[in-house]
Image (cartoon, rainbow, N blue to C red):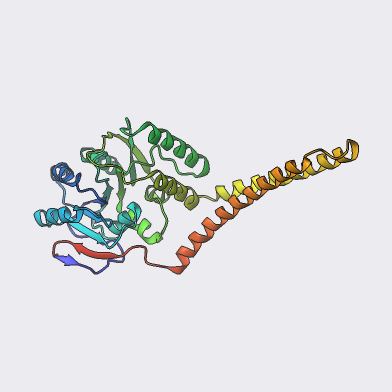
Amino acid sequence: MSSTAPEPEATRRPGVELSVVIPVYNEEPNLPALFDRLYPVLDGLGVPYEVIFTNDGSADRSQELLAKQHAKRPRETRVIEFNANYGQHMAIMAAFERVRGSVVVTLDADLQNPPEEIPKLLGAISAGHDCVGGYRVVRRDSAFRRYASRLVNSVRRRTTNIEMADQGCMLRAYSRPVIDAIVRSGAINTFIPALAYTFATHPAEVAVRHEERNAGASNYSFYKLVRLNFDLITAFTLAPLQWFTLIGLGCAVGSFLLVLVLAARRLIIGPEEGGVFTLFGVLFFLISVAIVGIGLIGEYVGRTYQVVRQRQRYFVSRILEASE
């Protein structure tokens, strides 16, 4: 059965204990293998569950494969269709607003995070943790992505109070109160693992395996990775603005001292040959600092504007789910 009516907030369906949320964007080569590995793992848990796929505007046959899987396992499978591509985190948020289980697990569709590792996260939830993140022991990524991830993790630790060993791992589990808090937050530009961490009272992390991508190429370009991590930093801290203020103060002091030095030199030694180029160099540096500051301020103002205008974050064209 298809449904188009939006659900304003997550609702609990009696009997559903586990919800698995999977965003999908052009994952046609990976979906058959994902189905073959995921459902046996969940069946083996012995608890009622649902799997929610959000098709994030895929241009390949992903939607066709998801529809077939829904027809094959209608009670356990739900499919949310976006009319366009809104990004991985909006796809996850759409599913969070509709989950019915008391525990929610997020998983990528490319099988780099093995579904067989889900029981590890559920074990930590059963032990009393309300937000459990996986961290990849041996990463099967390129050297560039590994070192870039370390750099970003280091920057995040120094600019926020969010402690995550591996922020890029999407294999995570959350208790229902954390999910409800995320939904109520109404965040537009957000990094969900970090947002969940701020709402959690007893977070934890467990080691998980990491495999090479089953097929195809990553949908995250270098620009998207940079954009994502910039969103993370600017969404959870004012440190960039504070750094800019400190740099501005330092430049002002340095410029004032340079003016004094040049003035003293002119009075004692005489005009410096070619000194105009020094002044131009200082001027260009100060202008570049000002431009960076304007960009930072614009980023924060833009975020405020996106919130106050209350534009719809995404549009759901159809939902495939079984009748109650």
- Residue 275 rendering spot, x and y as whole percentages: 78, 40
Please report the residue visible at 71 percent of the width from the left and 45 percent of the height from the top: 280
Which corner quadrant of the image does residue 96 belong to? bottom left
Q: Please give left or right for residue 1 compared with residue 177 in the image.
A: left
Q: Is residue 299 left or right of residue 220?
A: right
Query: Residue 298 at what x, y percent from top left?
Result: 55, 58
x, y percent for residue 19: 23, 52
Q: Could you tell me if residue 76 is visible in this image? A: no
* Residue found at the far front of this picture: 273
Q: Is residue 154 visible?
A: yes
Residue at 15 percent of width and 57 percent of height: 67
Q: Of residues 229 and 40, which is closer to you in this image?
A: 229
Q: In x, y percent, where is residue 94?
A: 30, 59
**In the image, what residue occupies the spot 27% across and 57% down?**
57
Q: Which quadrant of the figure has residue 3?
A: bottom left
Quarter of the image that includes the N terminus:
bottom left
Between 65 and 271, the one lying in front of the other is 271
